[in-house]
Image: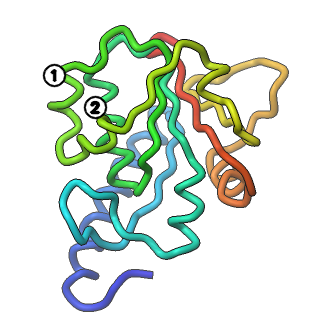
Amino acid sequence: SLHGGGEHRVHGRIVAAARKRAHACQKSGMALFYLLPRRNPSPNLPLETDTSTAVALARVRIVLVRTSHPGNIGATARAMFTMGLTRLVLVAPQRFPDAQATALATGATGVLDAALVVSTLAEALAGCTLVVGLSARPREFAGHVLAIRDAARIARESAGEVALVFGTEMS
């Protein structure tokens, strides 16, 4: 639910724009999901969410594997910040820190500053009870393939640490 009054009109525009983007992604075959936080009390801090959502989001880490374009790291940080996520883990990025990452992280440099850089995927996933690999391409492998909404529900219901893993830009 959204806050009343003027915030409803603002969120209505945000939701409408997000729906257009989601439709475009669906047409291209890309899967996506996101949470729309309620309001931002302070710049460069994650948006405020209700307690249960905040607890669920605190258990989620976004893992980028062997990122070759630093701008993608910055854009990811900005998207995370918008959704209330703060835990970014980078596996062997080609260039980080980098001015291009900072430039694309507009308003979300706190996420970049707190990013953990590790050498291996195993290090990035240490302590996770659920790992979700995301891809815009159909895959054939031994794992369990889920629709994005089902994966989001399972991640939300998971009691432990959750990693959302994005492979290289080429995979």
Question: In the figure, is residue 124 to the left or right of 157?
Answer: left
Between 29 and 134, the one lying in front of the other is 134
Pick out the residue farthest to the right: 142
User: What x and y, as percent, mark residue 168?
Assistant: 48, 15
Quarter of the image where the N terminus is located: bottom left
Which residue is denoted by mark 2 in the rendering? 74
- Residue at left offset 59%, top offset 26%: 124
Q: In the image, residue 153 lies at what x, y percent?
A: 68, 57
Relative vertical location of residue 145 with respect to residue 21 in this rendering, above or below: above
Neighbor class of circle 1 (other Cα within 10 Å; few <14, some 14-19, many 20+) is few
Kind of residue indicated by mark 2: Gly
At 39% from the left and 66% from the top, the residue drawn is 37
Q: Is residue 171 above or below residue 13?
A: above
Q: Residue at x 23, y 79 (%)?
A: 9
Q: In the image, is residue 84 above or below residue 67? A: below
76 over 49 or under it: above or below: above
Mark 1 residue element: helix
| Camera-nearest residue between 9 and 37 | 37
Q: Is residue 167 left or right of residue 25?
A: right
Indicate which disc, 2 or 1, sits on the residue closer to the N terminus: 2
Residue topped by disc 1: 99
Q: Residue at x 41, y 57 (%)?
A: 84
